[in-house]
Image (cartoon, helix red, strand yellow):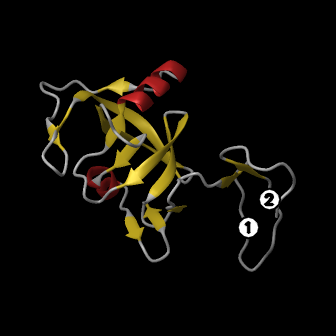
Amino acid sequence: MNLVPVYLGAVPGRALVDSGAVSSLMSSNMYTRIGSRSNKIRHVQMEQIPKLVTADSSPLKTRAVIDIDVKEGGVSSPFNFIVVDNLGFDCILGMDLLEQAEAIVDVRSSLLHLFGGLTSVPMTKTGNHVVVSTTATVSIPPFSEAVINVKPNRNHLKGNYM
């Protein structure tokens, strides 16, 4: 599977990268988690919520269409998700999001490159890997070395790492 860690609003989750999905979806469980922890959900007013079917033509029960900030690999951008029941993942990143983010799915190296290579996110079977980011904006001159403070996206083993 191609799972990547994401933040939807400020809530961490795991997303399936699915180039066969036309639309990006969010589980109703994730929607509830976000609603209980933040007020970052913006509902999109539509005359009719899209009717969706799975690959085997089974209907998906849709609840709402929302606009929320999606953070992948340290880069955040707003995007619309269709909230559905009985989704096996926190969310599915479909072709609509992948196209908007100029994504390149590199199967050989198991990386998802976004925004013209601005960021790359490892794809794994669990989506539970640790991503580190700098604690402040830094500039490192070419051909130099630096020690930089970083923070992980989730708690890992205690200790100092290099």
Relative height, residue 85 to residue 75 (above, below): above
Q: Is residue 121 left or right of residue 51?
A: right
Q: Quadrant of residue 30?
A: top left
What residue is drawn where x is 38% and y is 67%? 104
What residue is drawn where x is 27% and y is 51%? 96
Question: Which of the pair 139/5 is nearer the observer?
Answer: 5
Q: Position of residue 37 (x, y in %)?
A: 54, 22
Which amino acid, by three-letter code, is at mark 1? Ile
**Disc 1 or disc 2, which is closer to the eye?**
2
What residue is drawn where x is 78% and y is 76%? 144
Question: Which of the pair 8/159 is nearer the observer?
Answer: 159
Q: Secondary structure at mark 1?
A: loop
Which amino acid, by three-letter code, is at mark 2? Ile
What residue is drawn where x is 33% and y is 56%? 18
- Total numbered labels placed on residues in the image: 2
Give whichever of discs 1 and 2 has the lower sequence position.
1
Would you say the residues marked 1 and 2 are in contact, meaning their CB atoms lie under 8 Å apart?
yes
Question: Which of the pair 15/38 is nearer the observer?
Answer: 15
Q: Which residue is mark 1?
A: 140
Question: Which of the pair 156/121 is nearer the observer?
Answer: 156
Q: Secondary structure at mark 2?
A: loop
Q: Which residue is mark 2?
A: 148
